[in-house]
Image: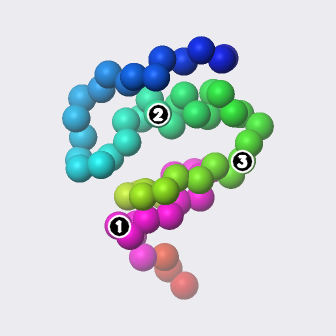
Amino acid sequence: MHNLPSVIVSRRGRHSLKPEQAYTDIEQMFPHLTPRIELFARTPRAGWTSWGDELPAEEP
């Protein structure tokens, strides 16, 4: 899969929440690259390393 559209049409979510399609496209384009990284994340995602000020605190 080499030619994905550069514009995603999606319903507006919470402030700065990325559309689900963005994750799906990246996972399809690079299935062999794991873990992936998301900067400015709001929620953790399986198979991704998430960095962001608004992530829930990690349990010890």
Rendering colour mode = rainbow
For label 1, the residue is 54
Type of the residue with mark 3: Thr
Type of the residue with mark 2: Ala
Relative to 37, residue 57 above or below? below
Instruction: Using the numbered discs, state the Cα–Cα distance from disc 1 to disc 2 in whole angstroms.
Output: 19 Å
Instruction: Using the numbered discs, state the Cα–Cα distance from disc 3 to disc 2 in whole angstroms.
Output: 16 Å
> Is label 3 in contact with label 1 (beta carbons under 8 Å)?
no
Q: Residue 22 carries which label?
A: 2
Relative to 30, residue 58 above or below? below
Name the dominant secondary structure of the magenta segment. loop
For label 3, the residue is 34
Q: Which image quadrant for residue 25? A: top right
Query: Seen in the image, is 48 located left or right of residue 19?
Result: right
Q: Pinpoint residue 6: horizontal percent, then vertical percent.
A: 46, 23
> Is label 3 in contact with label 2 (beta carbons under 8 Å)?
no
Query: Seen in the image, is 33 located left or right of residue 11?
Result: right
For marks 1 and 2 on the same chain, the one whose residue lies earlier in the sequence:
2
Quadrant in the picture for the C terminus: bottom right
Q: Residue at 65% of width from left, 28% of height from top?
A: 29
Region rendered in magenta:
45-57
Q: What element carries label 2?
A: helix
Q: Pinpoint residue 56: horizontal percent, then vertical percent.
A: 39, 70
Q: Pinpoint residue 21: horizontal percent, then vertical percent.
A: 44, 29
Q: Which image quadrant for residue 49? A: bottom right
Q: Which image quadrant for residue 41? A: bottom left
Query: Seen in the image, is 29 located left or right of residue 52?
Result: right
Instruction: Using the numbered discs, state the Cα–Cα distance from disc 3 to disc 1 in whole angstroms.
Output: 23 Å
For marks 3 and 1 on the same chain, the one whose residue lies earlier in the sequence:
3
